[in-house]
Image (cartoon, helix red, strand yellow):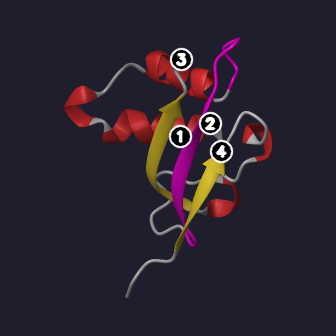
């Protein structure tokens, strides 16, 4: 049976109310970067850049979230499961 998922775009304008919390994205990336794993505070710096929390910086995040959480390991708001994340930083 195939999974049903949505791609959520998280921006500087909507991240506080986004279906996926920034902390969940940080946990997901920290777990799944394997041997390229950065410390959580460095991942957070990148997320802050993309979400405009770092002054004069911005970008966006795309998160694939499953409609119904299967194992609860990386649950977003509402119990949805995070399947994948892309972080885009606009660097000029």
Magenta-tinted stretch = 52-68
Q: Percent from the top left, x then y, of residue 5?
A: 52, 70
Crowd tier of the residue under label 3, counting other residues whose Cα lies within 10 Å: few below 14, some 14–19, many 20 or above: some
Residue at the extreme top of the image, as rendered: 55
Q: Nearer the viewer, mark 4 or mark 3?
A: 4
The reply to whether discs 4 and 1 touch (Cβ–Cβ < 8 Å) is: yes
- Inter-mark Cα distance, 4 to 1: 11 Å
From the image, tell me which residue sits under label 2: 22
Cα separation between marks 2 and 3: 11 Å
Q: Left of 28 or right of it: where is 13?
A: right
Q: Is residue 65 magenta?
A: yes
Task: Work out whether mark 4 precedes mark 1 in sequence or the reverse, and give the earlier one.
Answer: 4
Rendered residue at 56%/72% (across/down): 68
Of residue 74 and residue 59, the one placed in the foreground of this image is 59
Which residue is nearer to you in this view: 54 or 74?
54
Structural crowding at the residue carrying mark 1, measured as other residues with C-alpha within 10 Å and reported as few (<14), some (14–19) or many (≥20): many
The answer to whether the residue labelled 4 contacts the one labelled 3, judged by CB atoms less than 8 Å apart, is no
């Amino acid at each position: 049976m195939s999974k049903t998922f949505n791609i959520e775009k998280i921006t500087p304008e909507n991240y506080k109310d986004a279906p996926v919390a920034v902390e969940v994205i940080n946990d997901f990336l920290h777990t799944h970067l394997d041997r390229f794993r950065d410390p959580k505070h460095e991942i957070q710096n990148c997320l802050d850049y993309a979400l405009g929390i770092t002054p004069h910086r911005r970008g966006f995040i795309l998160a694939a979230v499953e409609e119904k959480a299967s194992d609860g390991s990386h649950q977003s708001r509402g119990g949805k499961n995070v399947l994948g994340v892309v972080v885009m930083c606009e660097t000029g």
